[in-house]
Amino acid sequence: MTQRRRRLLDVEAILDAALACIDERGRLTMADLATRLGTSASSIYHHVSGRPEIVELLRERLVAHLEIPPLDRSDWGDQVVSWMRSYRRALAEHPNLIPLLSEQTMTAGSVLVGYDRVAGLLGTAGFPEEQVMLWVSVLDSYALGAALDLAAPDEVWRASGGDTPALDAALRAAPQGRARADAAFELGLEALLAGMRSRLPVGLI
């Protein structure tokens, strides 16, 4: 039986099991992973170096579905919007993965290539070089937060009954559930892009 399990164990199987652990438990330990795979932690180490490599491989899986900016002659803002929408969708499929992605340095090659495209896009648009990574960080943070919001319960706020009249009125007027999350994301993205354009040197807006 042990030999059969070892023959079936490969990197993709490890990643599938790791993602299942994260989705269900909100964490990833080598002990939990070994239990799910029906093998030993030492067998897993024959295929990956450890938890950090697994997280980076999962990061690579995620970016495989992103719409990377084509760096063509289309408007840079439109390219950013497409990237952000696809980034949010990909992150929202596995919200429990977000804290794990945020806690370690990115090293995956395909991931860095994607960020290089975004940095190149912003540089070509005219943003000063010293601001490019600041804007990349802003966009990254917004996508992460918006993905978590998409995974939130339909009722994010529950009025206390009489003590919060402004909040009560706002909640009644706003869309609910997924519609609220989508509308909030698009509204914020529009505002973010407007703010970015306003910071471009005169003549490049």
Image (spheres, grey):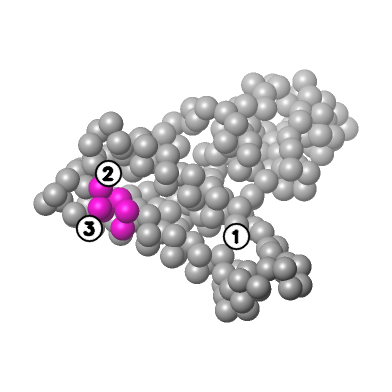
Secondary structure under the numbered disc 1 in the rendered image: helix
Q: Is residue 31 above or below residue 84?
A: above
Residue displayed at 67% across by 24% down: 50
Q: Is residue 16 above or below residue 33?
A: below
Q: Which residue is mark 2?
A: 122
Horizontal side of 71 relative to 107 (left or right) equals left
Magenta stretch: helix, strand or loop mostly: helix
Q: Amino acid at mark 1?
A: Leu
Horizontal side of 62 relative to 74 (left or right) equals right
Q: CA distance from mark 3 to mark 2?
A: 13 Å
Residue displayed at 67% across by 27% down: 51
Secondary structure under the numbered disc 2 in the rendered image: helix
Secondary structure under the numbered disc 3 in the rendered image: loop
Q: Residues within 10 Å of mark 1 (few under 14, many from 20)?
A: many
Residue 79, given in percent of the width and then of the height, sits at: 31, 55
Nearer to the camera, 160 or 77? 160
Visible residue check, residue 6:
no
Residues shaded magenta: 194-199
* View extreme (left): residue: 203
Q: Is residue 162 above or below residue 38?
A: below
Quarter holding the C terminus is: bottom left
Visible residue check, residue 131:
yes
Q: Which residue is mark 1?
A: 150
Whichever of labels 3 and 2 marks the residue nearer the N terminus, that label is: 3
Residue 205 lies in the magenta stretch: no
